[in-house]
Amino acid sequence: MVEPAEHFLKSTMSSDQSANVELIKKHIGEYPDFPKKGILFKDIFTALRNGEVCKAIKSVLLAYVRENCPDVQVIVGLEARGFLFSLLIAAELGIASVPIRKKGKLPGTCARQEYVLEYGTDVFEIQQGSITPGQKVLIIDDLLATGGTMTAANLLVQQIGGIVECNLVILELTQLGGRKKLEASGATVHSFIHYDDIE
Ligand SMILES: O=P(O)(O)OC[C@H]1O[C@H](OP(=O)(O)OP(=O)(O)O)[C@H](O)[C@@H]1O
Ligand SMILES: Nc1ncnc2[nH]cnc12
């Protein structure tokens, strides 16, 4: 079963934005046993094949950021799907866009953080100097599952002096506990669509 995140629907979402979320939800792809047996992979790229969905995603993200985190100065996008949305928001708001990438992909001196996700382990990096100490940051990705990825991103931003104001994802797999993990470390996270039936 798929439902828009209720807290967002009830408190801040207009009927236009509810319709946008419904449209996005209908177009998310599902791939069983990818990338490993037992994983039901939720694919945002499938949804992006539809131009109306692209517009809907842009609209809901911007409406949310404008209303809930109007003071952010840097949008940090997480490799790979977070990149699709970080520049979209940054360009519209006229603020900085900074990547966090898998190890070995970014030039210059980087801060580094290992993490565990639903189907493996990885290492994230951020470039030293990409955020000015004290800047307010929004971290964006396509999906929250175990929260390993987003937690590592929070640690990296903090390591180089950024202040994480907000974590934003389009999809959340609630059974995997990512929200609890993030909230336990004092972070807040917002999602637009949550799936409650994925073990
Ligand atoms: O909450 P978690 O359990 O940490 O998982 C969430 C992460 O998993 C996926 O990325 P993936 O690591 O597959 O990387 P990719 O986008 O580079 O393919 C997804 O895009 C999130 O970044
Ligand atoms: N089930 C899933 N679908 C898409 N991305 C993911 N990242 C971690 N788990 C995932």
Image (spheres, rainbow, N blue to C red):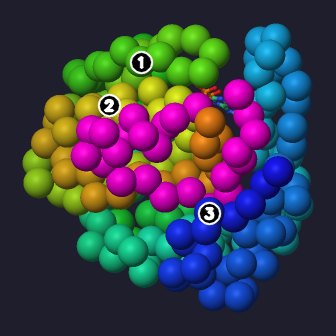
Depth order, front residue of 70/129? 70
Q: Is residue 8 magenta?
A: no
Mark 1 residue element: strand
Depth order, front residue of 7/92? 7
Horizontal side of residue 195 vs 7, given as left or right: right
Horizontal side of residue 27 vs 17, given as left or right: right
Depth order, front residue of 98/119? 119
- Do labels 2 and 1 touch, CB within 8 Å? no
How crowded pointer 2 is (Cα within 10 Å; few <14, some 14-19, many 20+) is rated as many
Residue shown at 75% from the left, 74% from the top? 20
Mark 2 residue element: strand
Quadrant observed for ligand 2 in the rendered image: top right
Label 1 sits on what residue type?
A: Tyr
Q: Quadrant of the C terminus?
A: top right
What label sits on residue 5 in the rendered view?
Answer: 3
In x, y percent, where is residue 177?
Answer: 52, 35
Distance of mark 2 from mark 3, alpha carbons?
Answer: 30 Å
For the magenta stretch, what is the residue range? 176-199
Kindly identify which residue carries mark 1: 115
Kindly identify which residue carries mark 2: 126
Q: Does the beta carbon of the residue at mark 1 sit less than 8 Å from ligand 1? A: yes
> Which of the two marks, 2 or 3, is nearer to us in this view?
3
In x, y percent, where is residue 36?
Answer: 77, 12
Label 2 sits on what residue type?
A: Ile
In x, y percent, where is residue 167?
Answer: 41, 52
Label 3 sits on what residue type?
A: Ala
Q: Is residue 191 visible?
A: yes
Distance of mark 2 from mark 1, alpha carbons?
Answer: 14 Å
